[in-house]
Image (cartoon, helix red, strand yellow):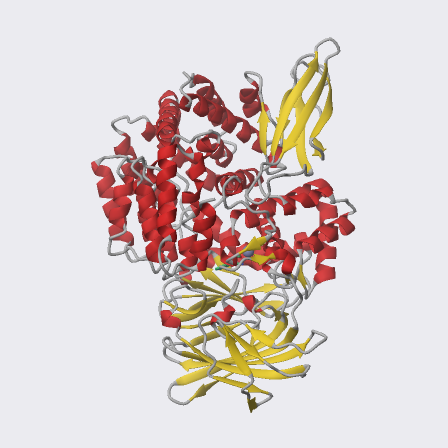
Amino acid sequence: PVTIHRGDYRPPEWQLPDIALDFALGIDETRVTAALSVVRSADAPAPLTLRGDGLTALAVRVDGEGWNDWRMEGPDLVVDLGDRTAAVVEVETAINPAANTQLMGLYASNGMLCTQCEAEGFRRITFHPDRPDVLSRYKVRMEGDKALFPILLSNGNCIEKGESEGGRHWALWEDPWPKPSYLFALVAGDLVVNRDEFVTLSGRKVELGIWVREGDVERTSHAMQALKNSMKWDEQVYGREYDLDLFNIVAVSDFNMGAMENKGLNIFNTRYILADPDTATDLDYDGVEGVVAHEYFHNWSGNRVTCRDWFQLSLKEGFTVFRDQSFSADMGSPAVKRIEDVRLLRAAQFPEDAGPLAHPIRPDSYQEISNFYTATVYNKGAEVIRMMHAMVGAERFRKGTDLYFERHDGEAATCEDFVRAIEDGAGVDLTLFRRWYEQAGTPRVTARIESDEDTGERVLHLAQAVPATPGQPDKAPTLIPLRIKAFDLDGGHGIEEERLVLLDRGEMAVPLGHYRSRPMLSLNRGFSAPVIVDFARAGGELAWLAAHDDDPFARYEALQQLMLDTLVAAVSGETVDHSVVIDAVAQTLGGRAADPAFVAEAVLLPSEAFVGDQMVVVDPDAIRRERLALQAAIGGALEAEWRAILAETPPPAAILSRKAKGGRRLRGVALAYLAATGLPDTPAVAFGIFSDADGMTERQAALATLAHGDSDERVAALDIFYQRYRDNPLVLDKWFQVQAWSLRPDTVDAVRELAGHPDFTLANPNRVRSLYGALTGNQAAFHQADGAGYRLIADLVIALDPKNPQTAARMIPPLGRWKRFDEARQTMMKAELQRILAQPGLSRDVTEQASKSLL
Ligand code: HT7
Ligand code: ZN
């Protein structure tokens, strides 16, 4: 496969100011006529290269005349326009949406037609430069059978519609805003709408529509509220107003990712639109809110200012994730949101940054761009924006973003443009900070307090190191902003204010002041930098911070570290005393009435994978054993507490207040701790909660707890759940998922069997993720000693690749973490990667991921 390098960027030789598309719609055949008005931007004559993927040119015309001066170069169409500087190039193609199992381009889902063009799907619809720095105004005419496709949607505004012969009808859409091809969208189908409106800051009325299948409209109210809240928030926090009279969202059930920000016509995975208390958990509700906001925010960070090339993806994705995280924090609990975001970063991004697929947030090269929609580009990218925000403060950051939007509105920009706008607008020098864009790998910060016992002077010594990553053996220090606070327990100088330390060199000494005894140091508060901190704590420090730190994130972090230290020691064969953790959990539980959501997050044990990340060689079985032992110890010691929490009447499922959600979350945690004790009544307690639940949060938590065990109640609950929700795909996904998450020793066998269940299908990415994605997240099962978990994933990749290479490629990274495991597992994991690579006709997506994973 060809490798594309960031340094090879060249501006386009032709611009396409206007495009007219004509679609004659059909499920099995859609005819597309594209009229591209092209204007040469190169100085000298240059052929017009239009990218294609699986297309045939049925006819080519230039300025209305049949044209023979064209050729195919591989999948692309090259049109020779002589020395013309402008022309209208018309190309006809025919595509088969029903056969499009890749779900890229124009495809059929559940009887409707829809598109997904980012990153390079437009070239599967018609020939086009298909690069994000070519922006055009689009006019789209579509015509189709009125009974099959009563609703016809595209970007912008519908400017005309009418009936035609043979039961057909048509619509003409126009988008006044120039956009890259990846933001083009079309939907045709039998849909119903939830309509609302929003009045913008300047008093313009915007019509809002959420389009779904008949019967689903009742489940769209949360998404609609989230949309209106997002529109308002972007005006208040970033001064960004919506810029069309219409904003449509369509939900589709077959979708490779979460959603897509097409201009004025967002297309969503149903998973991030549909929610009601009976079928969606509180976490699902939060997912809807966050993704609706994310896609809406792209209207400015992504659409009005887009990316020059795909290496700049984090320009729109990192910034937009930061924006959606800030929005969700403002809508709910900032502390809990930060905990969730950091947990995700550590679970998905840190391992990526430590493995063979590590890349900077602005990658230097790729073979298949779809493989770079990663936690690094998205989540580490968001952390990089967050650090800039922390260094300059909200007000100056806003000056920087105002300047960015003003300078680059209507343009295809770069990450460098963003950094320069923050520098100029906020008045800050980010020269050194730019290394975050260049270097992969999670920096490691080592901290140590040096004390002069005579004078009481304490100095914090900090050192940073960025690990070597593929292609980047040597790293330079970067700028790391660390929020710190030292607590004085001896009453010497009182409690100091928090400080922001800018660690801008390899090593640095930070005077802390004079203290009679060593102060309690709270470091990297709020996770101000996405780094790993090594800090040898004195005994009792973590427990003190877990109880007393005034930054809730730091309290959470201290308790997690305490748990982690205990688990790592136990896994390493040390005899451990669980009582320190138990006491700290008990202390934290004392705050549950005031903030149950925070308490629920804080008392959760670190995941098995995160424990593994702390070890030189991961031992999945020992980690499972010791984590279960600690869970059982906490469960048993605090049994009365857990039972008291469970004895309280749960908040009604329809109430989504912070407190109600927190209460339900804590009940789920309490049930898990109680069940871990193995006390004989726990299956009955869980089954009682499952049966009495008035909503999915409690029901799923109880089902997941039962799924770990071996009781009659487990069998009954799984059956009841299946029978009740077998016709609801999103809930059926949960049924597959809880079984693949199970801590039972036979989970790999169960997953293999579930893959043969009549409701399992490779055609739906949500279903694939719910079964196999859950398995790769189940450390001890995926790494089962006989390699059966690895074989199952490799079999899946091989079977899925011909149908949906993007989704197949996303299953590979867990196999690439082989260096972290013992030799026997390493051998088996590599063998599976090699088996995948030996398949004939493998996609570019899977080839790139599997071959890089072997390095
Ligand atoms: N910008 C969107 C990316 C996306 C995508 C990329 C590759 C293949 C399928 C896809 N669907 C959506 C999503 C987002 O970040 O908002
Ligand atoms: Zn995005």
Where does the image place residue 491, in percent across and percent down from the top left? 69, 15
Which residue is pictured at 69% across the width and 38% down the height?
479
Q: Is residue 215 left or right of residue 314?
A: left
Task: Check the image and report above or below for 271 versus 632.
Answer: below
Where does the image place residue 691, in percent across and percent down from the top left? 28, 42
Where does the image place residue 601, in percent across and percent down from the top left? 48, 34
* The furthest residue to the left: 712
Is 107 or 826 nearer to us in this picture? 826
Q: How many marks?
A: 0
Is 588 or 387 nearer to us in this picture? 387
Where does the image place residue 73, in percent across and percent down from the top left? 51, 73
Is 214 or 256 nearer to us in this picture? 256
Task: Check the image and report above or below for 141 versus 397.
Answer: below
Task: Check the image and report above or below for 134 versus 509.
Answer: below
Q: Is residue 274 among the parts visible in the rendering? A: no
* The furthest residue to the top: 454
Which residue is pictured at 38% across the width and 48% down the height?
834
Which image quarter: residue 25? bottom left
Q: Is residue 662 left or right of residue 67?
A: left
Task: Check the image and report above or below for 116 versus 815.
Answer: below
Which image quarter: residue 815? top left
Q: Is residue 248 among the parts visible in the rendering? A: yes
